[in-house]
Image (cartoon, grey):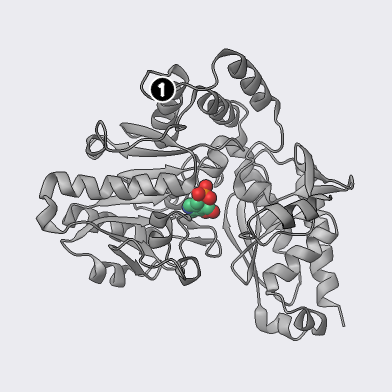
């Protein structure tokens, strides 16, 4: 049976898959089962931060794999503690504590539990202080906690009763956020740079309002950096990149990571500052596979490589190179290039695309149409909602790969624009 047939016969149909089977990856490229090479600007949706099969990860996998693969959190694990030290001292640079899990949704579940438990410890059950406010177009994962937190109807449909205690406000709308917060609010959770919702950066004003409300109502300000963290914006922390040139200074109480944090190894994490970390004391939370010796060693190898090889600087430099070229393009249906660092979104104008007969006939969303056309020409990208195409290359993407992507992508957009 072919891979397509095996998939069809034995796998749950919960994913809409593109009609290719990837069998090998190296650096910035993947190969499908027919041996066709594709430039990978999807990287497993912002996961393979160092590209495919980087030597640092291979070394960590084989050396730690020969030493100790798994060990329960009943015991002390050196590599896990070293990874936590890196997160606190190099990434967040604010004193606090770390918990490891296996995915972004799990990390956000831990944030939600942290906010509720912190409020419970201080104000008691009767206070009802357990609500979490999140933002429209957000995406926080597919667990029951994740879909309750996610403010997109499509992820919730059919899964009632949802976990109660969530309020959703329009992203970057400080007035509505202010109206929504009450004594019952335990936390505010948002992505500093929304990914699945269409590459939307938070404004510094919104972040400041959230921080003021945190102080006023004694709640937790929590950032979901699952997609935008771990260096993708050119800083270890997405929120810092956003505030870099502003007069505003905001410090979160807790942050979640996954995706690029492990470079392709399934690792998730949260950091909680010293004031709220004690809320998750012994017996309150856990994960069999969270922070295994193997996962921690591999994750540490990824983060140390990013640090030691100046990869954060590469992220900002490549963003500038991309922006310089794209600003000179003349594509009638391309409205904008949004985003930060190497989390970029090409914003398509659906009305202008609707004038193109071939697109209109396709029945696809604008983003799906472009992603498919680009894939036919040998490059992987990802849709973000109906109207945005994401570029999420590896953080150590080379000049040559960026040049190739720019030429290929512009060529496809021009071809679509001139199609009858
Ligand atoms: C911002 C954000 N949070 C959480 C998640 C969920 O992560 P995972 O798929 O690892 O559970 C995602 C995944 O796309 C994400 O983009």
Q: Residue at x 70, y 50 (%)?
A: 321
Circle count? 1
Residue closest to the eye, 113 or 311:
113
Which residue bears the numbered disc 1?
81
Q: Quadrant of the C terminus?
A: bottom right
Q: Residue at x 72, y 84 (%)?
A: 354
Q: State whether residue 229 is above or below residue 191.
A: above
Q: Position of residue 105 (x, y in %)?
A: 45, 49
Left or right of 222: which side holds 304?
right
Instruction: Tell whether circle 1 marks a residue whose Cβ is less than 8 angstroms from ligand 1.
Output: no
Q: Quadrant of residue 374?
A: bottom right
Q: Position of residue 207 (x, y in %)?
A: 35, 57
- Quadrant of residue 26 within the rendered picture: top right
Residue that appears at 59% across and 32% down: 306
At horizontal 67% and vertical 84% (from top left) the residue drawn is 351
Crowding near the residue tagged with mark 1, few <14, some 14–19, many ≥20 C-alpha atoms within 10 Å: some
Q: Is residue 117 visible?
A: yes
Left or right: where 407 falls relative to 346: right
Q: Nearer the viewer, residue 340 or 155?
A: 155
| Image quadrant in which you'd find residue 28 | top right
Label 1 SS: helix
Residue 65: % across, % down: 61, 19
Relative to 214, is 100 above or below? above
The answer to whether residue 249 is visible is no
Image side of residue 23 versus residue 80, left or right: right
Q: Give the percent coordinates (x, y) of residue 130.
A: 22, 56
**Front position in the image: 242 or 43:** 43
């Amino acid at each position: 049976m072919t891979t397509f047939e095996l998939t069809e016969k034995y796998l749950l149909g919960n994913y809409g898959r593109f009609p290719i089977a990837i069998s090998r990856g190296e650096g910035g490229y993947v190969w499908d089962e027919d041996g066709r090479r594709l430039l990978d600007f999807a990287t497993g949706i912002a996961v393979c931060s160092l590209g495919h099969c980087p030597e640092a990860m291979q070394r960590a996998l084989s050396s730690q794999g020969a030493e100790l693969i798994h060990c329960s959190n009943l015991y002390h694990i050196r590599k896990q503690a070293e990874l936590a030290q890196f997160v606190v001292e190099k990434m967040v640079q604010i004193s606090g504590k770390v918990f490891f899990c296996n995915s972004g949704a799990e990390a956000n579940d831990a944030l939600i539990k942290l906010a509720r438990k912190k409020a419970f410890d201080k104000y008691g059950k009767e206070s009802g202080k357990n609500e979490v406010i999140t933002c429209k177009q957000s995406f926080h994962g597919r667990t029951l906690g994740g879909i309750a937190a996610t403010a997109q109807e499509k992820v919730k449909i059919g899964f009632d009763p949802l976990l109660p205690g969530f309020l959703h406000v329009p992203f970057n709308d400080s007035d509505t956020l202010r109206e929504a917060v009450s004594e019952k609010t335990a936390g505010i959770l948002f992505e500093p740079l929304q990914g699945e919702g269409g590459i939307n950066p938070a404004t510094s004003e919104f972040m400041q309002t959230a921080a003021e409300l945190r102080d006023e109502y004694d709640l937790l300000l929590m950032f979901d950096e699952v997609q935008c963290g771990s260096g993708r914006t050119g800083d270890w922390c997405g929120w810092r990149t956003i505030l870099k040139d502003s007069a505003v200074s905001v410090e979160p109480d807790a942050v979640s990571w996954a995706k690029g944090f492990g470079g392709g190894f399934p690792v998730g994490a949260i950091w909680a500052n010293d004031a709220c970390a004690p809320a998750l004391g012994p017996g309150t939370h856990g994960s069999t596979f969270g922070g295994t010796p193997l996962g921690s060693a591999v994750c540490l190898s990824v983060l140390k490589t990013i640090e030691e090889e100046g990869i954060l600087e590469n992220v900002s430099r490549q963003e500038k190179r991309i922006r310089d070229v794209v600003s000179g393009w003349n594509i009638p249906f391309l409205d904008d290039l949004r985003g930060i660092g190497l989390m970029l979104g090409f914003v398509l104008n659906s009305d202008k695309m609707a004038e193109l007969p071939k697109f209109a006939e396709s029945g696809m969303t604008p983003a799906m149409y472009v992603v498919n056309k680009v894939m036919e020409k040998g490059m992987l990208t990802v849709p973000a909602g109906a109207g945005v195409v994401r570029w999420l290359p590896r953080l150590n993407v080379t000049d040559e790969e960026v040049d190739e992507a720019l030429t290929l992508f512009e060529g496809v957009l021009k071809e679509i624009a001139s199609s009858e």
